[in-house]
Image (cartoon, rainbow, N blue to C red):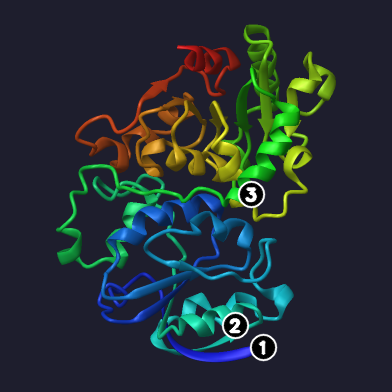
């Protein structure tokens, strides 16, 4: 264990936005989707500072490997955690006490070696406040709201925030792509069409797509295209495997790629490079696909709105359940202050998105 004394702060009170000519460690113990959204914030940050980002869990942090704005520091562990297993919960920091003054960091190896090489002078730990649609355009998404806290007003004024924020994810390393291709070829060889289905998230069950509708979607898809192949992100994603014909046309992600020696995010990006379409709820894989782009995407929204989270993708259509309107979510500031439609959306009169509607959008 290595101890390091650094100034430590949160996103509030303007302290971070005032930093100049510092070396900043961004400690980011958040979900995969939040890592993807951070990619849109990084280009807005003060350019006189140098940035590194990290969390305990390289399965997620690796999604930003190769980005041009911040160095991704490996923690040395792929499985997600808070550092407790390494004897250093949250680097020994207490989020509530970060006020810009020096604090003691406890950094385990091999994380410590990577951090020493970067040689930070400041650490930022943002709790990444969840706005749920309460912030007005152009700070209407969760990421944009964070940018308004981390970036000075003078610098924000130099960007055209009425346009989508530019963000990219680097492609997977050739050896990772080759490993994914080899396993994918066994399941979905040339002549098949490859779909990714991500029907559930880990942070909130209320946003999940009903398993019965997911099974119905697979059945309908197979009837319309006997050559379709579906990679289901959740294992067993669709429950009873006997509930649809052609079990060989559906496989779980871990079943296919669990033995690939690469962090999850990099392997998943390699899968997306060979994907023809994705259907998903607003969870990590969906947000990665929204940024990666290049293929049709159908978003399943039953408890949130896409205006709260994602930058627009011209290949995406978002299907929105009636509970959004019933709860008045579509009248919150993030939606009502948009000067023009931000996403391609269809508001439905049912709470749960029907499989038939999803397939119709994909085939349109």
Quarter of image, res 271: top right
For image coordinates 32% across by 55% down, the residue present is: 145
The one of 169 and 288 positioned closer to us in this rendering = 169
Q: Which mark is residue 1?
A: 1
Q: Report the residue at 31% width, 46% height from top.
A: 140
Q: Earlier in the sequence, mark 1 or mark 2?
A: 1
Name the residue located 62 percent from the left edge and 7 percent from the top edge.
224
Q: Which residue is at 45% across, 88% downward?
A: 6
How far, Cα to Cα, is label 1 from label 2? 8 Å
Name the residue carrying label 3: 176
Q: Is residue 225 above or below residue 114?
A: above
Disc 1 crowd, CA 10 A, few/some/many (<14, 14-19, 20+): some
Residue at mark 2: 112
* Residue 146 visible in the shown view: no
Q: Secondary structure at mark 2?
A: helix
Are the residues at dot 1 and dot 2 in contact (C-beta closer than 8 Å)? Answer: yes
**Image-based side of 311 in relation to 270, left or right:** left
Q: Residues within 10 Å of mark 3 (few under 14, many from 20)?
A: many
Give the secondary structure at mark 1: loop
> Residue 87, how many percent across, how many down?
71, 81
Q: Relative to 88, is 39 on the left or the right?
A: left
Q: Viewer-nearest of labels 1 and 2? A: 2
**Which mark sits nearer the N-terminus, 2 or 3?**
2
Q: Is residue 64 above or below residue 24?
A: above
In the drawing, does residue 314 fall left or right of residue 228?
Answer: left
Q: Nearer the observer, disc 2 or disc 3?
A: 3
| Mark 1 or mark 3, earlier in chain | 1
Q: The C terminus is located in which quarter?
A: top left
């Amino acid at each position: 264990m290595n101890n390091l004394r650094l100034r430590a702060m949160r996103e509030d009170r303007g302290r971070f936005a005032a930093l100049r000519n510092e070396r900043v460690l961004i400690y980011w113990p958040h979900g995969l989707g939040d890592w993807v959204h951070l990619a849109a914030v990084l280009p807005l940050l003060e350019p006189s500072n140098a940035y590194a980002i990290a969390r305990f869990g390289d399965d997620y942090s690796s999604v930003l490997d190769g980005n041009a704005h911040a160095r991704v520091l490996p923690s040395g562990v792929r499985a997600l955690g808070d550092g407790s297993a390494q004897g250093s919960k949250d680097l020994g920091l207490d989020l509530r006490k970060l006020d810009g003054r020096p604090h003691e960091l406890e950094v385990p190896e091999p994380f410590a070696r990577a951090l020493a090489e970067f040689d930070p002078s400041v650490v930022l730990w943002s709790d990444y406040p969840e706005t749920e649609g309460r912030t007005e355009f152009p700070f209407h998404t969760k990421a944009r709201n964070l940018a308004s806290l981390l970036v000075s007003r003078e610098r924000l004024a130099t960007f055209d925030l009425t346009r989508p924020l530019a963000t990219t994810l680097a492609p997977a390393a050739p050896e990772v792509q080759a490993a994914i291709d080899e396993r994918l070829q066994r399941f979905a060889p040339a002549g098949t069409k490859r779909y990714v289905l991500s029907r559930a998230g880990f942070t909130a069950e209320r946003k999940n797509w009903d398993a019965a509708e997911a099974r119905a979607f697979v059945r309908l898809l197979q009837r319309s295209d006997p050559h379709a192949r579906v990679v289901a992100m959740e294992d067993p994603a669709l429950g009873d495997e006997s509930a649809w014909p052609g079990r060989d046309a559906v496989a779980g992600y871990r079943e296919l790629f669990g033995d690939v020696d690469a962090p999850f995010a990099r392997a998943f990006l390699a899968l997306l490079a060979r994907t023809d379409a994705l259907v998903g709820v607003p969870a990590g894989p969906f947000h990665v696909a929204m940024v990666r782009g290049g293929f049709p995407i159908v978003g399943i929204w039953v408890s949130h709105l896409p205006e709260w989270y994602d930058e627009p993708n011209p290949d995406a259509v978002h299907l929105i359940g009636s509970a959004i309107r019933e709860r008045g979510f579509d009248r919150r500031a993030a939606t009502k202050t948009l000067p023009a439609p931000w996403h391609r959306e269809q508001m439905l009169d049912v709470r749960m998105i029907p499989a038939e509607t999803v397939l119709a959008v994909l085939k349109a």
